[in-house]
Amino acid sequence: EVQLVESGGGLVQPGGSLRLSCAASGFTLSSYWMHWVRQAPGKGLVWVSRISNDGNSMTYADSVKGRFTFSRDSAKNTLYLQMNGLRAEDTAVYYCARAHISGSVDYWGQGTLVTVSS
Amino acid sequence: EIVLTQSPGSLSLSPGETATLSCRASQSVGSSSLGSSSLAWYKQKPGQAPRLLIYGAAIRATGIPDRFSGSGSGTDFTLTISRLEPEDFAVYYCQQYGGSPEVTFGQGTRLDIK
């Protein structure tokens, strides 16, 4: 069974850092492209970042470029989102998600809440 | 950047009725490696992660009943939900995954019970 379990969310002050983790099971990360998608409270879905199946290519939304870094540990089958320079507008539930062969997203984690506030 | 605009913003219908949701792209949505439009639809209930319903504009994801159908190409896409059931009342998002940035979502359509 495919499962994605995020962790690492919490309350952080503006300008601070946080690292989110996403533990994958039921499949191998090296076979799939993966995404981070976020959702501010009461708002819609916003794409954040993508990593290729070989882990060599990452792309980012303009709003997080230069502040967020998407990486993975193949041995642990785990993804990471390092978030630096956090702003109030980064407050959201962060989902990791698996890309379907079509390019859409077929599996989502349950999400982890990041709150940026003083 | 491809901007997706969903309409209506909200819709109130009764169980058994048919819902028609629209998604319009600011420019043509490209085709995926599968040869179909790079447009997907998701359903999200409160407190839950989104669930894939349709990909390739018209292909139902695994386990999705045939009450859900997608259509369209280019810039105009539609999700139709027939014979609405209580569990269908949720927020629906369209998504394009063939442009730049790689992925964008519409703002969502809320489907409420009348």
Image (spheres, grey):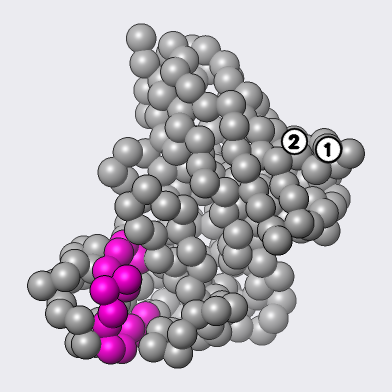
Residue A21, position as x, y percentages in the image: 66, 33
Choose mark 1 or mark 2, whichever is in front: 1
Magenta range: B79-93
Say which residue appears at 46% left-offset and 28% top-offset: A114
From this viewpoint, which residue is outermost toward the left? B114
Can residue A46 be seen here? yes
Q: Which of A76/B42 is in front?
A: A76
User: Label 2 is found on which chain of the structure?
Assistant: A
Say which residue appears at 75% left-offset and 35% top-offset: A71
Which residue has dot 2 on it? A71
Say which residue appears at 46% left-offset and 15% top-offset: A12
* Position above or below: B76 against A44: below
Which residue has dot 1 on it? A76
Say which quadrant the C terminus of chain A sits in. Answer: top left
Residue A27, position as x, y percentages in the image: 78, 57
Amino acid at dot 1: Lys
User: Label 1 is found on which chain of the structure?
Assistant: A
Answer few, some or many: residues within 10 Å of disc 1's Cα (few below 14, many 20 plus, some between 14 and 19).
few
Say which quadrant the N terminus of chain A sits in. Answer: bottom right
Q: Secondary structure at mark 1?
A: loop
Residue A79, position as x, y percentages in the image: 72, 39
Residue B64, position as x, y percentages in the image: 50, 80
Amino acid at dot 2: Ser
Res B30 → quadrant: bottom right
